[in-house]
Image (spheres, rainbow, N blue to C red):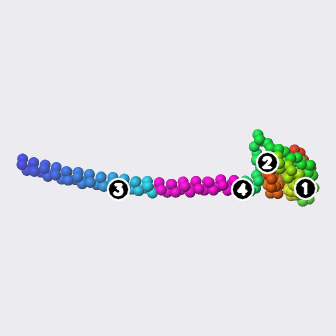
Amino acid sequence: MAEAIEKQEEVVAKKGGSNILLIIVVVMLFLILAGGAAAAYFMLNEDTEVLDAAQKAQQTQAVKTAAMKKEATGSRITDYTKVGPMYPMDQFIVNLYNEGSSRYLKCTINFELSIPELSVEMDSKKPLVRDIVIKTLSAKTYEEISTIRGKENLKDEIAMKVNQVLSDGKINNLFFTDFVIQ
């Protein structure tokens, strides 16, 4: 019986030793995993902060560029609830640019001014403004201006070109009050 007790003590001693070894391995694995997770968190967090800052800077630059481009090109303002003072132009009749056929455009344009005082400058530059409009209209083909999108592009182009010669204000928008293609 003494031998059985000794064998049982040896088995318990071996099991206890292996339990300690198992506990040490589990604790080491946990520490390694926790350290790796912490390192990954901090590394990825720094990268996302850098990426977020870069994206914000890029978005800010894009907004500034768009604002500068809009200001430089003199894009039309399309807020129809706040229409400014109007400056009517005489009727335009021009030949459209077409090879092999003759088409003409008859239109009347009203310019929306940014400030009422701009009408004085428009009066003094009326021949120049008419020349700009005539050149722009006669350079277009029927296909370019026959659609609604084409007419909107034409408005943008005329507004941009006229705004380049104005100094007291700008053209916010322009309206075709007559537009006939023959």
Seen at 19% across and 51% down, the residue is 16
Q: Residues within 10 Å of mark 4 (few under 14, many from 20)?
A: few
Residue 108 x %, y %: 89, 47
Seen at 80% across and 47% down, the residue is 115
In this rendered view, identify the residue nearer to me: 148 or 122. 122
Quadrant in the picture for residue 162: bottom right
- Give the label, 4 or 2, closer to the camera: 2
The three-letter code of the residue at mark 4 reads Lys
Residue of label 3:
32
Q: Earlier in the sequence, mark 1 or mark 3?
A: 3
Q: Residue furthest left?
A: 2
Q: Is residue 130 visible?
A: no
Distance from the alpha carbon under mark 1 to that under mark 3? 82 Å
Disc 4 + disc 3, Cβ < 8 Å: no
Q: Main secondary structure of the magenta part?
A: helix
Residue of label 2:
114
Residue 149 x %, y %: 79, 49
Q: Which residues are magenta?
A: 44-69
The three-letter code of the residue at mark 2 reads Ser
Residue of label 4:
69
Q: Earlier in the sequence, mark 4 or mark 3?
A: 3
Q: Earlier in the sequence, mark 1 or mark 2?
A: 2
The three-letter code of the residue at mark 1 reads Pro
Residue 164 x %, y %: 80, 57
Residue of label 1:
127
Disc 1 + disc 3, Cβ < 8 Å: no
- Give the label, 1 or 3, closer to the camera: 1
Is 39 displayed left or right of 100 in the figure? left
Q: Residues within 10 Å of mark 2 (few under 14, many from 20)?
A: some
Distance from the alpha carbon under mark 4 to that under mark 2? 18 Å
The three-letter code of the residue at mark 3 reads Ile
Q: Secondary structure at mark 1?
A: helix
